[in-house]
Image (spheres, helix red, strand yellow):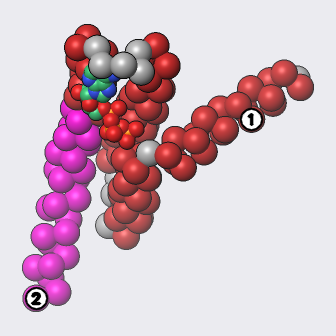
Amino acid sequence: MKKFTRGFGYAFKGLWYAAKTQLNFRVHLICTIIALVLGYILDISVTEWLWIFICIGLVLLTELLNTALELLCDVISPEYNEKIGHVKDISAGAVLVTAITSLVIGAVIFLPKLLLLIHHAA
Ligand SMILES: Nc1ncnc2c1ncn2[C@@H]1O[C@H](COP(=O)(O)OP(=O)(O)OP(=O)(O)O)[C@@H](O)[C@H]1O
């Protein structure tokens, strides 16, 4: 049991490290808060909440894996290496893909409700 809780400690240490050192991770956390607040205010459905949580999980997951891969690359090859450059670029590309996908899903869910709200307020 102690080993199990220690594992959680290491995981939170990793999350804290990413939040402390990675601006992108902090930006994604802010976007997460905005999505949660919008979801609450706009009273989205259970299915829409599921999509939002999947997006949040995927973006944070890819950002964490990208951070870990970047660190590993820096240890393996601190000097310039073309292939390491590609690894880092591909890893950053993975984050971009999930971020754009999440943005589109967020827009599909929130935009019609926001427009309706603005229309009613006007
Ligand atoms: N060792 C390397 N060899 C070749 N190209 C590299 C190397 N390190 C970085 N690069 C190139 O520079 C880009 C940015 O690298 P990196 O993400 O490490 O820098 P950064 O954005 O300053 O990182 P950090 O997230 O630590 O601020 C990479 O995507 C890659 O194209």
Quadrant of the picture in which ligand 1 is shown = top left
Say which of 118 and 10 sits in front: 10
Range covered by the magenta-colored residues: 96-122
What residue do we see at 58% from left, 41% from top? 17
Q: Is residue 107 above or below residue 105?
A: below
Graded by Cα atoms within 10 Å as few (under 14), some (14 to 19) or many (20 or more), the crowding at tag 2 reads: few
Say which of 29 and 116 sits in front: 29
Residue type of the residue flagged with mark 1: Gly
Residue 103 place in picture, x, y as percent: 21, 47
Q: From the viewer's perspective, tell me whether residue 50 is left or right of residue 6.
A: left
Q: Which residue is mark 1?
A: 9
Question: Of the residues under marks 2 and 1, which one precedes in the sequence?
Answer: 1
What residue do we see at 19% from left, 69% from top? 114
What residue do we see at 39% from left, 35% from top? 63
Q: Looking at this view, name the residue that lies furthest to the bottom.
A: 122
Q: From the viewer's perspective, tell me whether residue 49 is left or right of residue 87.
A: right
Instruction: Give the quarter of the image for residue 37.
Output: bottom left
| Structural distance between the alpha carbons of marks 2 and 1 | 50 Å
Q: From the viewer's perspective, tell me whether residue 97 is left or right of residue 66.
A: left
Say which of 74 and 55 sits in front: 74
Q: Majority secondary structure of the magenta segment?
A: helix
Q: Which residue is mark 2?
A: 122
**What is the secondary structure assignment of the residue under circle 1?**
helix
What residue do we see at 74% from left, 35% from top? 9
